[in-house]
Amino acid sequence: MELADKPPSEATRLGPKVSRRSVLAGVPAAAMLTLGGRARPLLAEETPRPKRPKIAALITEFRRNSHAEVIVDRILEGYGWASEHYHPKLDLVAMYVDQFPDADLSRERESRFENLNIYPTIAEALCLGGDQLAVDGVVIIGEHGSYPVNKKGQTLYPRYEFFDQTVDVFRNSGRGVPVFNDKHLSWKWDWARQMVDTADELTFPFMAGSSLPVTWRVPAVEMPLGAEVEEVMSIANGNVDSYDFHALETIQCFVERRKGGECGVVRLQALRGDDVWKAFEAGSWDSGGWNPALLEACLCRSHELAPAREGFNHVYPTFDDMRRMVKEPVAYRFEYGDGLKATMLLLNGLVGDITFAAKLKWQDEPLSTLNYLGGGGTTQPHNFDGLVWYIEKFMHDRKPPYPLARTLLTTGLVAAGVESLWQDSATLDTPHLAIRYQPTGESTYRRA
């Protein structure tokens, strides 16, 4: 099925065959967050479904090339999809904007779209100025803006706070609506867990993640359902508490399809600087590194592998080249409950994109691909086309197109990576990440 030309198949549209409750299966009871008993469901199945759901967007900052711009503008003005300029069957009627930089675009959008209003609080945005919930869906875009950075290097984006205030409106109104959260759930693990638990307790649909699971793959490969996977790797550019999430989400989109489904992660160690170069030289996972064939596969799939020497565009970098080009490498090495080994590398200065490779049992050559996000500049935001497509499907169908558990697990991996770095690369046991779930039958990546 080519998503560029057709809507998702029935299998994709219906999302995972497991409930949100199974997100937390396998987590020790002592680690469970309790909400004081089962709450009354806030979204009845018989609730009428409008042909054009009214949407409220809760935004940290709306400027050029922000996530707010590339998501909201696609809802308002459409985007290229296959051979047409497609307009989503959604009506964006309300925005809450937390910060207004000099380059703010939200006020211009409000002035140009007659039915769109900016409200001073989240509650007023969701109630359209009244005292009861008056929208059919909520989009939380808590990315970009000027927010504090804690001692561990985490930017304190208020995604949890936006979600919590949204839930307050649901409770006061006696009903809920679908909620989408852009990227990982929160910088704080306990809050991320609480977000998932709350959606489960109150039974409103919840979807979260970035554009990586729904962008193009070059080549368009899929992890065979039920494959036996021994070791995987993803290489990316970017920073900790940011692009590490994208690389980890890339890994998870593939490995969740392995034999037995997802069983969670049992331990993680994060490395930085010279410790990463020592791991490079180790030569294998058991020696403290990774499979060199996976590294080569990822680098050779990259469309933005920096030339190792001026005037030579197709030279594979030597170890000395990589040490010279990458000033501060970062690696997360982690193990799943079934023995699968995984490495995430951030190699700024060497690559400018996100690749993936896997060693499958009984297959010598790695399965590998590039998650294609565009060529940068004016083309890069097109990787958000697929994300807005699935946001629209979610708002209409009220069922997430892929497991929320994936985003919960990758959120926890980001937090664990940050914590390990903060603790001087300590190896951390992660019993709270024993998260079990099954994948959808059909992946959501965009077919070219």
Image (tube, helix red, strand yellow):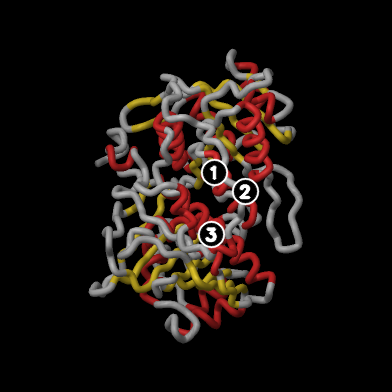
First-in-chain label (1 vs 2): 2
On the image, numbered disc 1 is attached to which residue?
201
Q: Residues within 10 Å of mark 1 (few under 14, many from 20)?
A: some
Label at residue 35: 2
Whether 134 is drawn above or below 347: the answer is above
Identify residue type, mark 2.
Leu
Residue 273 lies in quadrant: bottom right
Q: Give the mark nearer the N terminus: 3 vs 2.
A: 2
> Is residue 349 left or right of 441 when viewed as pictured?
right
Q: Nearer the viewer, residue 400 or 168?
A: 168
Above or below, 31 relative to 213: below
Q: Which mark is residue 237?
A: 3
Q: Nearer the viewer, mark 1 or mark 3?
A: 1
In 3D space, how far apart are the residues under numbered discs 3 and 2 (Cα atoms)? 39 Å
Q: Image quadrant for the C terminus? A: top left
Mark 2: give few (<14), some (14-19) or many (20+) Cα within 10 Å: few
Q: Marks 1 and 2, Cα distance to the nearest angstrom?
A: 8 Å
Task: Specify the quadrant of the image occupied by residue 129.
Answer: top right
Distance from disc 1 to disc 3, alpha carbons, whole Å, reads 37 Å
Give the percent coordinates (x, y) of residue 246: 51, 55
Under circle 3, the secondary element is: loop
Q: Nearer the viewer, residue 14 or 391?
A: 14
Q: Which mark is residue 437?
A: none
Judging depth in this view, the residue of 46 and 37 nearest the camera is: 37
- For the question of whether residue 412 can be seen, the reply is yes
Q: Are marks 1 and 2 in contact (CB under 8 Å)?
A: yes
> Which class describes the residues within 10 Å of circle 3: few (<14), some (14-19), or many (20+)?
many
Q: Which is more foreground, mark 3 or mark 2?
A: 2
Q: Tag 2's secondary structure?
A: loop
